[in-house]
Image: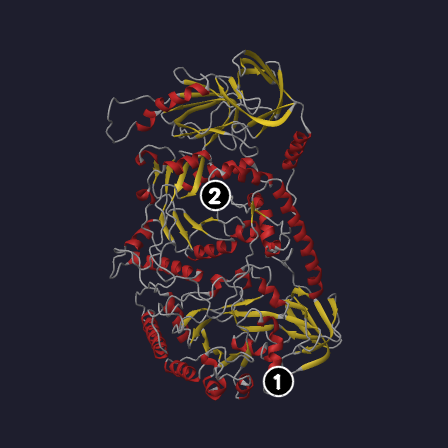
Amino acid sequence: MTPRHWLSSLLTLTLGSLLAQTTFPYNGVYDQREGYYAFTGATVHVSSERVLENATLVIRNGKVESVNAGGAGPQGAVPVELNGKHIYPSFIEVYGSYGMPEVKESRGSWNSPPQLESETEGAYAWNQALRPETDASALFTIDTKAAKALREAGFGTVSTHHPDGISRGTAAVVTLAEERENEVLLERNVAHHLSFDKGSSQQNYPNSRMGAIALLRQTYIDADWYGAKRREEANLSLDAWAELQDMPQIFAVDDWQDALRADQVGDEFGKQYIIKGSGDEYQRLDALKETGATFILPLTFPKTYDVSDPFAADLISIAQLRHWERAPGNVAAVAAAGIPFVITADGLEKPTDLHEAMRKAVKAGADSKVILAALTTGPAELLGIADRVGTLEEGMLANFIITDKDPFTEKATVYQNWVQGHPFELKPIQQVDLASGYDITVGGETFTAEVTGDPGSQKMKVTTAGDTTARDVTFSESGGVVTFQFRPGEKGGYYRVNATPDGEGYAGTGRDPEGNPITFTAKPRAATGADDADDDEKDDEDEPTEYKGRLTYPNIAYGLTELPQAERVLFRNATVWTGEDDGILQETDVLIDGGKISQVGQGLPDRGATVIDATGMHLTAGIIDEHSHIALLDVNESSESSTAEVRMRDVVDAVDENIYRQLAGGVTTSQLLHGSANPIGGQSALVKFRWGATPEEMLFEGADPFIKFALGENVKQANWGDANRVRYPQTRMGVEQIFENYFSRAEEYGRAMKAGDDIRRDLELETLLEILNEERFITCHSYQQGEINMLMELAERHDFRVNTFTHILEGYKVADKMAEHGAAGSTFSDWWAYKFEVNEAIPYNGALMHEQGVVTAFNSDDAEMARRLNQEAGKAVLFGGVSEEEAWKFVTLNPAKMLHIDDRVGSIKAGKDADLVLWNDNPLSIYARAERTYVDGKEYFNREDNEARRAELETERNALIQASLNDKNQGGKTQSPRGNSRRLLHCDSVNN
């Protein structure tokens, strides 16, 4: 029986196989037919590793009964001839939301007041973004339109979940058959899904990535405590959370840095997440491999940028162009790195885009067998359903697709997708496949035919020698006979012809426009130049990808192709600003080795070191910025008055170009602070500017932990609008009460812990207790003297000290009290009158605090200002007559003292870290430039190399633009140029 004639009967014959053995009653005469079929003559890809030529696949009752090379089908089975066709296991979507209700925002507008509490009804979690009780199997309903689209892409099975919230509950595995939900639901509770995105929740907390991480960490802790002893509440969410901890844990992330963040959470609580990646994994394969995670890779590749307009093209960054070029190679790169992965169609505009994306991935170096496994056996094993789907071995579900060729390397046609033994026709299995052109003779007339398109969607036009106007030809196939119909001129009747294959052409008979009998022949024309060009293009497609862009660390402008190594370097004959008792030394040598300062003196032997002639130049310790907000994803978790549990280290962004810019200005260390949106902010991150490192590698090892507090207008939400009159405090008096309340609670918490009481671990109170125990130290955003006095007095009542007041623009009024209290002051050099509470700031503030014995520093609080902190230090000489040597300490040794790292950095002394800057002039001068910047003895900035790199970037950029133009001209889909400039964060930056 030919495929053309048995499809309609199959739809009837297989009906019983899906309905058998169910608890539902049957209305009518029960149909017990078993769907018994033998598919012969096809190449059967039983799995990615087992392929049988000219094979026979036998299915019965919705399952594979046998698959063998050669041979006829068994007696009683309906034979299906598929000579020349391919059979593959249907794909498995490992990260789907098929059949789930739409995720809708519950409420809210731009001027809505903040929602402080969960609006979820029932005994559930305190936070609306936690939904572990969500059961996808209970929400699932068959969606025939979505099922059809997924089947057309080759899928037969989907792991579906409700993609809403941080904890999204459990996934269910369903097939894409269209019977009752009871019959297509294969497995419940196959995985727990998580993310950093709070989804539809309008609850204010969390409104930052660090808040989402803190919420996850506290939830793990709460679940353990709640599970051990329930205490005074019932919490259905925590009950559900406990039940899903032994399932596979799938965590969705936005980029490779997010993958590392998720893995750190998992490591803390003994969870190995499966990471649903973003497609940029190729940028940091070494770090991602160390996570030990299996990745779910999307095949979402950026469209080509339309760079036809040379000025609009300037909007696109080199990072965007590089990712456009390399994204299709991500699968190959991940596979080559030995990182286990599966593939998802999630993120594609439509599921059928998967086929083109697969071919792009193969062209970019991926193995087609590996991609097949990543869509079949890999997901099946990951979800624990490999005993039912993923291969066409005996006993597996009869889920398979029938194609005309290999869909991973060629533009294939998927004819049918069988799901649980039920056939779904996608395209007629017998289609007309015409040549690119024909010479047609019909009824004594001759025509020239041109054919375009692919089989199944081809179009034919004819012309005559006397009339070059092309006329459309309609054609169709039935039972091996092709019917052609066309009109030779603008007016008149039609030629109608039935033809059958004749060699490489067609021959037949029909009627002319007057109804007279005619004969018909169509002979293929010789290949044209255009055809040759098409062949050349296909040859080009087979060639391996040669990248025009570079892969750097980080993969943006001025990234490094190789990470620097600590070297033995001798700076010869420099003016050395030691920052120590030796002061400023003329014509002095400094030797660094193994990342440390080895010697300081004159006439030092080089002993194999690289010698840098520093004659006429100045060598200083690297600048330390006590107050910065660069290299962060978020700066404020502004939802509550205290967010001591959040950590800036969780949102360090190692791909911020401002790191490199500040290295070019001599900055080597920076304290990345929480903003000033609440009285008690988040824990600080102290980093070294190790350009090209991961976020975790940037952290300053062994440094004391700090936390950001804040006073003034921001914390009471002044000028935030009438909608923000909900969160306490709204006055400066209330700010003091917040501090008093939280430290009193922290003292109670500490007493309970000391007594050995079985209490719930609280990350927020734990952090505040560290302050009381002098294990964590405060940097406090401050302006007015009254509040500064208040916080010092409150600290003394609770027997601790405020380490640093930052901004401190009225510090000159209370400098004596600060010195007595032991507080340092990190201020601006000459900012004033930029808002009401700084109206009494003066540029002499730094000098006056210094004069009173306060450890004084100048900070940036600004990405641009940090590039010239050396000049800011010079203003202490101008405003207040501070000596040059002491003024330089305002940006080196003094901030090091504030941060308790002066034993490591901040001055030039044997044994300290080799964080050094070589300047062409006095570093306080406006003419000074950092020529070389070292961190841990590694050169991260070299001005001469920077100029060469700039030229290389221009060359690379032009090559990528030319590649974009070439891809567009070859028919590639395009997108308009759009920049992705970074949002610069400040103290008051808040996420909506």
Mark found first going from the N terminus, 1 or 2: 2
Q: Position of residue 309 (x, y in %)?
A: 62, 51
Number of residues whose C-alpha sits closer than 10 Å to that of mark 1, classed few (under 14), some (14–19) or many (20 or more): some
Q: Mark 1: which secondary structure?
A: helix
What's the residue at 63%, 34% (across, down)?
538
Q: Amino acid at mark 1?
A: Leu
Q: Quadrant of residue 367?
A: top right
Q: Amino acid at mark 2?
A: Glu
What's the residue at 55%, 57% (across, down)?
980
Number of residues whose C-alpha sits closer than 10 Å to that of mark 2, classed few (under 14), some (14–19) or many (20 or more): few
Q: Nearer the viewer, residue 408 or 961?
A: 961
The residue that label 2 is drawn on is 349
Of circles 1 and 2, which is in front? 2
Asked whether residue 779 appears in the rendered view, the answer is yes
What's the residue at 42%, 55% (across, down)?
197
| Label ID, residue 878 | 1
